[in-house]
Amino acid sequence: MDLVYGAEYEAFRTQVRAFLTDTWVPDGTLVKAEKRAAEAKFRHQAIEQGYLYRAIPRQYGGSEQPADVMRAQIIREEFTRRRAPMEVAGVGVAMLVPTLLECGTDWQKEHFIPRTLTGEYLWAQGYSEPNAGSDLASVRTKGVLQDGEWIINGQKVWSTYAQYARFMFALVRTEPNASKHDGLSYILLDLKQPGVTVRPLKQVTGGEEFCEVFFDDARTPQNWAVGERGKGWQVSKTTLVHERSSFIGNASSSQALYDKLVDLARNTRFNGRAAIDDPQIRERLLVLEGYVASHVYSSYRQFSMTAHGQSSGIVSSMNKLISTQIGHEVAKLARDLMGDSLLLAPPAEGTRGAGPEKWNNQFFGSLGVAIAGGASNIQRNIIAERGLGLPRDNVGQDAGN
């Protein structure tokens, strides 16, 4: 494992730092609209310098740079250090844009990608349904082609921030007589039309991050289908690859979360003393620090292998799994440190909270991370079967015998 960037890349780091010094000066006095305008201006400058949207061709609004994971990592580190805006967040940039580049038509790329990169077009994902979660091939939302338009009927659920999105990319069953996998099409839809109802789902934290979406004779043009008709399953796998590769839960996030937990222990009373001075708390922190350190060095290994053109194999699944476990353990210890403060209402959606109540969101959120970006049980199966060569788990298959 080689952890040295070398003179060439350190020189590049100096260039990035100089650019940030010249162009990004955070201003906490800006109102929301002014802040968005300042971020948009900065992103345009960063694209011109080749720092953002590096894999996107210039004709679609990107900077079109050669693939270089070392430079990409340096940009990520320096932008994060200065709290400078990175690419627009959301499933549109992270998942749909790479899918369109790989599977979309020229018109789809030209029409959707540039506006998605700027944040003008916001997207929701339409995969899961009430009876189709882990088994996406079981989706029942139907699409019928009539006079050059797809007529869509059905329901999607767990669509993140669909109430704010303009569009959705969805799996729709268009070939009812084909097999489960062969009967799907990958279709883009405008959510701001008659026949589409978006209902936010109230969460236990009080937030409304997820939505259910109903389609009642919703319409979308025939040429808004990505890839071949009936080949949506293959297109969707491309999207899922990008979802899991962009999953938020990396080693730097784990380290930052642990550091916040240590601060909580320093500022909380436990058994008549500062919690961090309590032997039991110190022991739990030490064990957790070991998990974080293993995640950090495992991520170094994955990064180093990628930088040298080597496949990291199951290491990505291992890192996803350990980041989830760290989140769970941090939540458990924070819960014990908070005591009665755990009963405080979580901070209002869109705010971070000023006191211990902000840890409620972390506690509840840690449960959902076990599903997001690939369920933990699935990750364990991948590690066991593909990485360690263990036999396939057949539990339950012989229950009727």
Image (tube, rainbow, N blue to C red):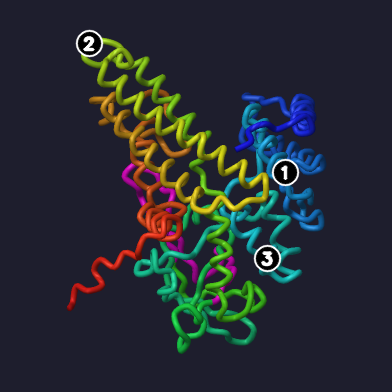
Picture disc at residue 215 = none
Picture disc at residue 102 = 3
Q: Is mark 3 on a helix, strand or loop?
A: helix
Instruction: Name the amino acid, label 3.
Output: Glu
Report which residue position mark 2 lands on: 272
Q: Where is residue 90 in the image (x, y as percent from the top left)?
A: 57, 50
Q: Residue at x 31, y 45 (%)?
A: 204
The CA distance from mark 3 to mark 1 is: 19 Å
Instruction: Name the amino acid, label 1.
Output: Leu
Mark 3 vs mark 1: which is more N-terminal?
1
Residue 167, picture quadrant: bottom right
Q: Residue at x 34, y 39 (%)?
A: 328
Mark 3 vs mark 2: which is more N-terminal?
3
Q: Give the range drawn in magenta.
A: 185-213
Observer-side mark, 3 or 1, equals 3
The CA distance from mark 3 to mark 2 is: 60 Å
Q: Along the line of sight, which residue is nearer the eye, 119 or 66?
A: 66
Q: Along the line of sight, which residue is nearer the eye, 147 or 172?
A: 172
Report which residue position mark 1 lands on: 52
